[in-house]
Amino acid sequence: MEIRIENGEKRFGEKVLFSNFSCQMDFHKHSLYRISGESGKGKTSLLRILASLEKLDRGELQFLFGEAARGEGSFKVSMLFQENRLLEKCSALENLQIALPMLSKKEILTEMTVFFEEEDFRKKVEKYSGGMKRRLSFLRAMLFPFDFLLLDEPFTGLDKANRKIMEEYLLSHQRKRPVIFASHENPLLWKDYGTIAL
C-alpha cells in the first residue's frame, strides 16, 4: 500500500496549516510512519484527511494498493483521536462492547488483561485516571478490524512503563498493516519508521 499527496493545501479559516505539501508513504518500506511538525502545523488535520473526516482544500490524495488506486472510504480505518471520546458513565468493558460488536465478551476481556487489572474492567470510566482512559482508547482503536491505523498523540498521559506496553502491543498485533502516528514524543520501541515532516 502507498499513500500519495500532491500539492496538498489545508486551511482553517484564514489560517493556512500547510500548502504545496507533497509526500509519499510506501508501506512496503516502512509499516509505520510518523508525522512530525510544530504545534499548529496541521498534523491532526492531516490525520483527519487520511481518515476521510476532512478534505484537502487543494491538491490530490491517492491510496494505492498494488497498481490500483482506491478512493476514500473503500477500506477500514481505525483512529485514536487526541480526545479519548469515551462514555464516562459506562464501564471500560461496556465501552469496548458498544464500539466493537463484532467481538465476543471473552475476546474483549482477554485483551483487556494486557492493560488493566480485572477489578478495573467494570469500573465506570469516569473513575479512571487520564492514563487509563488513554490506554482504553488505544485498545478500542487496536481491536477494530482495520486496514490501516491512525494514532494522534498516542502517548499522552502515559508513563514510561505503560508506553512500552502500548508500543509492544502494537508491534505484536499490527500484522504488517499500515500505521501512521503523530506525536511530540519519540517512541521507545518503534524504531523502523518513516517520517513525514509538515
Image (cartoon, rainbow, N blue to C red):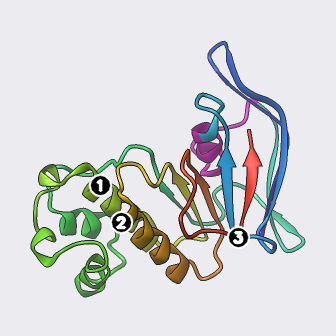
Disc assigned to residue 192:
3
Q: Which mark is residue 152?
A: none
- Is residue 108 shown left or right of residue 67? left
Q: CA distance from mark 1 to mark 3?
A: 26 Å
**Dividing the picture into quarters, in which one does residue 55 lie?**
top right
- Are circles 1 and 2 on residues that touch, CB within 8 Å? yes
Q: Residue 158, how many percent across, how many down? A: 36, 55
Which residue appears at 26% of the width and 49% of the height? Answer: 130
Residue count near mark 2 (Cα–Cα under 10 Å), binned few <14, some 14–19, many ≥20: some
Q: Is residue 12 above or below residue 115?
A: above
Tag 3: amino acid: Asp
Density class for disc 1 (Cα within 10 Å; few <14, some 14-19, many ≥20) is: some
Q: Earlier in the sequence, mark 3 or mark 2?
A: 2
How far from the left and from the top, in percent, is residue 121? 16, 71
Q: Which residues are magenta?
A: 44-57
Label 1 or label 2, whichever comes before in sequence order: 1
Q: Which residue is mark 2?
A: 162
What residue lies at 60% left-to-right and 28% top-to-bottom? Answer: 40
Mark pair 3, 2: CA separation? 20 Å
Q: Is residue 58 visible?
A: yes
Q: Image point 61% across, 71% down: which residue?
A: 147
Q: Is residue 81 left or right of residue 11?
A: left
Position of residue 27 in the picture relative to residue 186 (left or right): right
Which class describes the residues within 10 Å of circle 3: few (<14), some (14-19), or many (20+)? few
Residue 39 location, quadrant: top right
Residue 100 percent coordinates (x, y) = 34, 70
Which residue has dot 1 on it? 131
Are dots 1 and 3 in contact, CB under 8 Å? Answer: no
Label 1 vs 3, first from the N-terminus? 1
Disc 1 residue type (three-letter): Gly
* Secondary structure category for the residue under label 3: loop
